[in-house]
Image (cartoon, grey):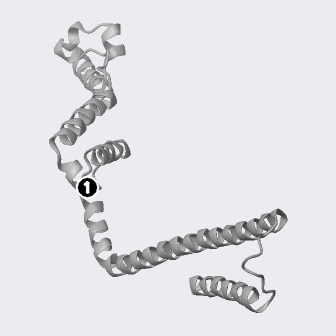
Amino acid sequence: MAEDKDTTFIEEEELEEKENEEGGEEKEPSKELNPEEIVEKNKQLFARAKKAEEAKKRLEAENLLLKKKLEELTKTKETGEKKDIDVVNLIKMISALKDYSPEELEYISTISKAKNISLEEAARSEEVQLYIQARREKVSKEKAPPPTSKSVPSKKPFSEWTLEDLKKASIEEIEEFRKWAKEQKG
């Protein structure tokens, strides 16, 4: 619509100029223009050309803007229709990825982007499965308690136990030792 306004504005200007040339001062065709008039005419023509170029640029920018708005509206309409499908897909993706830690999900996301595949496909890939398996094994080894320094003195008969054996013994072993000691006295 803005294009029609500007187009008609330019056409009206051209019509007015033609009327001014025809109806206004009539010049004799044989009369030559002096240099000052030529310079003045050139300035007028240049100004008209500049206005036309500016109008063209403005109209092109408006056209581009309107095209982008149309594309956005079209996309919005399409996504509105696909919203229900997207919710279902989101639920499927969440259920497929729920068992992974944040670090594992980050790796899955990286692979997904690198290979340009979905997150679910990346999670099922052999490369990701091997990485997750190795990472989980490493984490479980790191979390495993270090082997205790206490030796199991129960392998020795209680009659051979020393004070050091009692210090290293667990609570259950000490209870067993007390029972044994009472039996020995009684």
Q: What is the x, y in percent for residue 182? A: 27, 22
Q: Residue furthest right?
A: 36
Q: What is the x, y in percent for residue 132? A: 24, 39
Displayed quadrant of residue 4: bottom right
* Circle 1 Cα neighbour tier, 10 Å, few/some/many (<14 / 14–19 / ≥20): some
Instruction: Answer above or below: position of 157 versus 80.
Output: above
Q: Residue furthest front?
A: 30
Q: What is the x, y in percent for residue 181? A: 27, 18
Q: Residue furthest bottom?
A: 23
* Front in this rendered view, residue 184 or 135: 135
Residue at the image position 72 percent from the left and 79 percent from the top: 29
For residue 60, side relative to residue 36 (left or right): left
Q: Which residue is mark 1?
A: 118
Residue at the image position 78 percent from the left and 82 percent from the top: 27
Instruction: Answer above or below: position of 5 versus 153.
Output: below
Given the image, on which type of amino acid does mark 1 rest?
Ser
Residue at the image position 82 percent from the left and 66 percent from the top: 34
